[in-house]
Structures are given as structure tokens and as C-alpha cells.
Image (spheres, grey):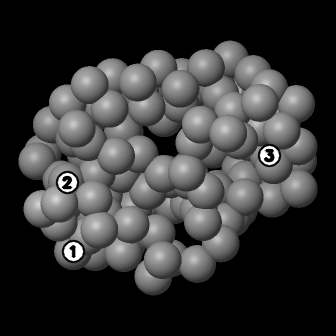
Amino acid sequence: MEIFRRTRDNVAILDLAGQIIGDYRDDLDAAIREAVNEGFAGVILNLEAVPKIDTASLAVIMTCYISLAKRDIKLVLLNLGRSVRHLLFVTKLDRILEKYDDEDEAVEAFREASLPG
């Protein structure tokens, strides 16, 4: 798995490529935490080039999601493939995690979250 980080509007976008299985979950955890520690308002995981993710890696995503939510920092998913969508559906995590098919909409979700209301 490879991780490429870019930014838009103070949001870290992690473009992931390859299967997220085994020890790669530690790399994913480190990349998410690094982005947050550098002060980004939130994290988008772009899974467009991820054909498969194992349940242990999904657990890492959920652990990060919960940890960040406690600090009012969002983590959302972008461009889920069929296999990843199916895993989220089977685990019922599709009801919890925000998912987007369009990067502009994902970035906009962070703007909406920061509006007073």
C-alpha cells in the first residue's frame, strides 16, 4: 500500500493505493495521526485505488474515527470500491462513517461542519 498526502482547504486528503491488509494498517494509522497532529481540520481517506481492506484495517479506521470525533475532528471516506462498500455494509459501519463519491462534496462537508449553528 502507498499513501500520498495532499491538502485542500486545511483538510488532509490521503490518497491510498493498494490493498490495506496486514501490517499496512499501522502505516495508515500513522498517516492519519500525523495529519491531525500537523493541525489539519480533518482527514479524507480516498480509497479509489484500494481494491481490498481487511477487518483489522477497518478497525484501525474506526479507532481513528472515534479518537478524532472526541476532538471534534472529522474523518470521512471517499471513492469506495465495491469490495470496501460491501465490507462496510456487512459490518454495518456504513451507517456510521460518512462516505462520498465526489471530492468536492467531501471537502464541503468540512466547511459545513465548521459553520456556527
Q: Secondary structure at mark 2?
A: loop
**105 lies left or right of 8:** right
**21 lies left or right of 62:** right
| Residue furthest out toward the bottom | 104
Q: Quadrant of the N terminus?
A: top right
Regarding residue 20, the answer to whether it shows in the image is no
In the displayed structure, 22 sits above or below 51; it is: above
In the displayed structure, 57 sits above or below 5; it is: above
Point 25% across, 70% down: residue: 111
Mark-to-mark CA distance, 3 and 2: 25 Å
Q: Secondary structure at mark 3?
A: helix
- Of callouts 3 and 2, the N-terminal one: 2
Mark-to-mark CA distance, 2 and 1: 9 Å
State the image coordinates of residue 59 (x, y, percent, origin top left): 61, 20
Residue flagged by tag 1: what amino acid is it?
Answer: Asp
**8 lies left or right of 63:** left
In the displayed structure, 30 sits above or below 41; it is: above
Mark-to-mark CA distance, 3 and 1: 27 Å
Q: Secondary structure at mark 1?
A: loop
Rendered image quadrant of residue 112: bottom left
State the image coordinates of residue 34 (x, y, percent, origin top left): 24, 37
Q: Which residue is mark 2?
A: 41
Rendered image quadrant of residue 68: top left
Residue flagged by tag 3: what amino acid is it?
Answer: Val
Q: How many numbered circles are shown?
A: 3
Q: Quadrant of the C terminus?
A: bottom left
- Of callouts 3 and 1, the N-terminal one: 1
Q: Which residue is mark 3?
A: 84
